[in-house]
Amino acid sequence: MSTAVHHAGSAALDIERIKRDFPILDQKIHGHKLVYLDSAATSQKPRAVIDALVRYYEHDNANIHRGVHTLSVRATEAHDEARETVRRFIQAACADEIIFVRSATEAINLVAQTYGRANVGEGDEVLITAMEHHSNIVPWQMLCEEKHAHLRVAPINNAGELELDAFEKLLSPRTRIVAVTHVSNALGTVNPLRKIVQLAHAHEVPVLVDGAQAVPHMPVDVQAIGCDFYVFSGHKVYGPTGIGVLYGKDEILAEMQPYQGGGDMISSVTFEKTTYNVVPYKFEAGTPDIAGAIGLGAALEYISKLGMDKIAAHEHDLLTYAAEKVGAIAGVHLIGTARERAGVLSFVMDSVHPHDLGTILDREGIAIRTGHHCAQPVMDRFGIAATARASFGVYNTREDVDALVEGIRKAQEVFA
Amino acid sequence: MTTELGDLYQEVILEHSKAPRNFRRPASANHEAEGYNPLCGDRCSIYIDMDGDKINEIGFQGSGCAISRASASMMTQMVKGKTKGEAVQLFEQFHNLVTGKDEAAKADDLGKMAVFGGVSKFPARVKCATLAWHTLQSALEDEKKQEAVSTE
């Protein structure tokens, strides 16, 4: 058996074959086979997604919800289908609960500026965690500043896990919303969402979940999680850039004011009064990224066909292997050692700064991310300025990890 | 190591990054500035004891990669005793060197700092090499900088 094939359930994923579905991976960087270990920054795109974009622009391109002509009908149907594909992928109750936005960042800003502005007042509190990406900190900070409200931060322990007891204590009668990541982009920690939602709902506080780093790696069921909002970006889950998703419970979305004004979000307009359209269109002003939504739909269909359970099992095996191999190198320290982890391996080295490692690995054809990963408070928590981060996608193999280990050793030689 | 990597991580750069010179805050410092690269979190503080127009004493502190540490270390050695105008001119030459604008700069006044010529093959690392210099420029201009100077 090839080491690239790992058994997950009854049938294993054939990773070498999957790799061939991603045209970009078939290239050399500085004379070495590309080893792409930066999927947490953005994933590569399978042929199915690239083809869907080309097909749309070559055959179906037109504006949606407008014309009676054939192309407009086709484009509208394809856009609607993409929304239904997203619904199915995250197990939402109905497609109207799926709002297309530019990114997870825009989705969080939308909720902060609509739900947040209507429900957070002076002296109220917004509760987040110490492992959030800047995109799940700054929109809330801006809201709190405007409303003279307080941002509360639930601490994490040395392994990078949320301290649930402290989180519970921070839920107060003034808490108006909880915003928490599903998977930490800097540490890989998977948060106990059901428990978090249960605690928040016991205080009648709604929960927004940042799922940007979760949806590529595991099956997500928003109804089972019970959260009120769930957001993610298309480009991290094998789709195009420029498209993202906001899921919101129907009854909450119906009550919320629009985010932006413009075409498509209205039922009727006069100079005296405008009546807003129903959800999801109320939140989708202007011509949307039609091709992006269709591309995202193709991406979700592609990975659904592979099977999210199998992808999760494959990546779990890979991450376990990587943590073992990289963690065993003398002078390397893993940052983030939570029991439940997914997607990323963060580490620092005694003798090599992350940037120097990044440069040396690049010359070996290996792409990793180095820096603070837009999570400076996480870096501060661990008393470091930066980490090196290897992150995984469905197309990565144990050989990729072996190449990383070899590259780390080379860097150590340079700085010996 | 590939030739380009070898050019980037020359022995003298590695040596300075491991044992940086003037890595301290001189007690007599009367000018200082903090530099920050928001893309990577690198920090560099420069402290100068200015005697009129002359850099009498200089030191630095902070955290960063090998390139930024070595650049700061060698810069402090190079500008000590120079005037403000001379230091600013050296920065210009150094900047041309690391961005590949001026090959001839290697042979000129930069002396030992010519080893940073290899950086020009690594555009993503230019900011690492120039952080200390940007901070120096800021420290030369103001007695006490309130805002950290940024590479962005």
Image: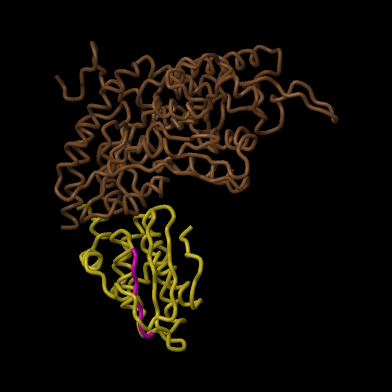
Chain colours: A brown, B yellow
Please indicate whether residue A142 sits to the left or right of residue A136 in the image. right
- In terms of depth relative to the viewer, which is nearer, A152 or B115? A152
Residue at (60% x, 20% y) in the render: A251
The majority secondary structure of the magenta stretch comes to strand
Q: Position of residue A217 (x, y in %)?
A: 35, 26
In front here: A19 or B44? Answer: B44
Image position, residue B85 (x, y; %): 47, 81
> Is A75 placed above or below B144 here?
above
User: Magenta span has B60?
Assistant: yes
Looking at the picture, how far across and down is residue A395, in whole percent?
30, 27
From the viewer's perspective, tell me whether residue A116 is left or right of residue B58.
Answer: right
Q: Residue furthest bottom?
A: B52
Q: Is residue B82 magenta?
A: no
Using the image as rendered, state which of residue A374 and residue A38 is in the foreground: A374
The residue stretch that appears in magenta: B56-62
Quadrant of the rendering where the C terminus of chain A is positioned: bottom left
Name which quarter of the figure residue B69 lies in.
bottom left
